[in-house]
Image: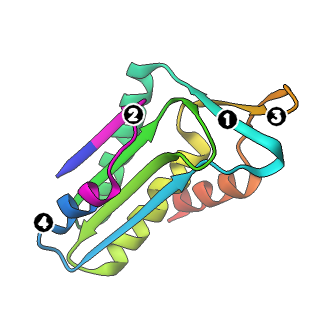
Amino acid sequence: MKRVAIQSGDFDVAAELAALESLGGGGVASFTGIVRSEGGLIALELEHYPAMTTAQVDRIVEEALARWPLLGVSVIHRFGRLEPGARIVFVGAASRHRAAALESCAFLIDWLKSDAPFWKKAHFADGATAWVEARAEDEAKAKGWQAE
């Protein structure tokens, strides 16, 4: 099972986990990202080019499927204007054993945080806006997977 979705609407974490659990493996790992409200943030606006984004996310999911013995993977990333508390990303992986599920999930979210082709603009309560840059520690984690 492979699911890649780039969408504006919310997603159902329980349904995603149930789909992965139904594959009969011994482990399911997941990560759900939530928009934070730090520093007066009132919204995070994500832009992307649909064909490019879908192709790049699909490529990295294929890499995870080739690297680990997975039964299934689900990656959902939202775009548009999201307020604090909104779900922004879901990554889930199912495998016969926990290590593959955990490692592949970490690999996928590290890549999404540093290299996925989304442009993020932060909107603040005082009216200011700022483009969000990838954090150095996120880039370092993603690069660490290249060495393996």
Residue drawn at the location 76% of the way across and 41% of the way down: 41
What residue is disc 3 on?
125
**Is the C-beta separation of discs 2 and 3 under 8 Å?**
no
Q: Is residue 61 magenta?
A: no
For marks 2 and 3, the one nearer the N-term is 2
Answer whether residue 8 is visible to the viewer in this image: yes
Q: What residue did someone put label 2 on?
A: 9
Type of the residue with mark 3: Ala
State the SS at label 2.
Answer: loop
Badge 1 or badge 2: first in the primary sequence:
2
Q: Which mark is residue 23?
A: 4
Disc 2 crowd, CA 10 A, few/some/many (<14, 14-19, 20+): few
Against 34, residue 41 (above or below) is above
Q: Secondary structure at mark 1?
A: strand
Residue stretch in magenta: 4-16
Q: Secondary structure at mark 3?
A: loop
CA gap between label 2 and label 3 equals: 24 Å
* Residue 68 tag number: none
In the displayed structure, does residue 103 sit left or right of residue 121?
A: left
* Of callouts 4 and 1, the N-terminal one: 4
- Colour scheme shown: rainbow
Upstream in sequence: badge 4 or badge 3: 4
Query: What secondary structure is marked by label 4?
Result: loop
Q: Nearer the viewer, residue 60 or 51?
A: 51
**With respect to residue 57, does 67 lie above or below?**
below
Q: Of circles 2 and 3, which is in front?
A: 3
Residue 31: % across, % down: 45, 62
Q: Is residue 28 toward the left or the right of residue 133 in the image?
A: left
Q: Alpha-carbon distance for marks 4 and 2?
A: 25 Å
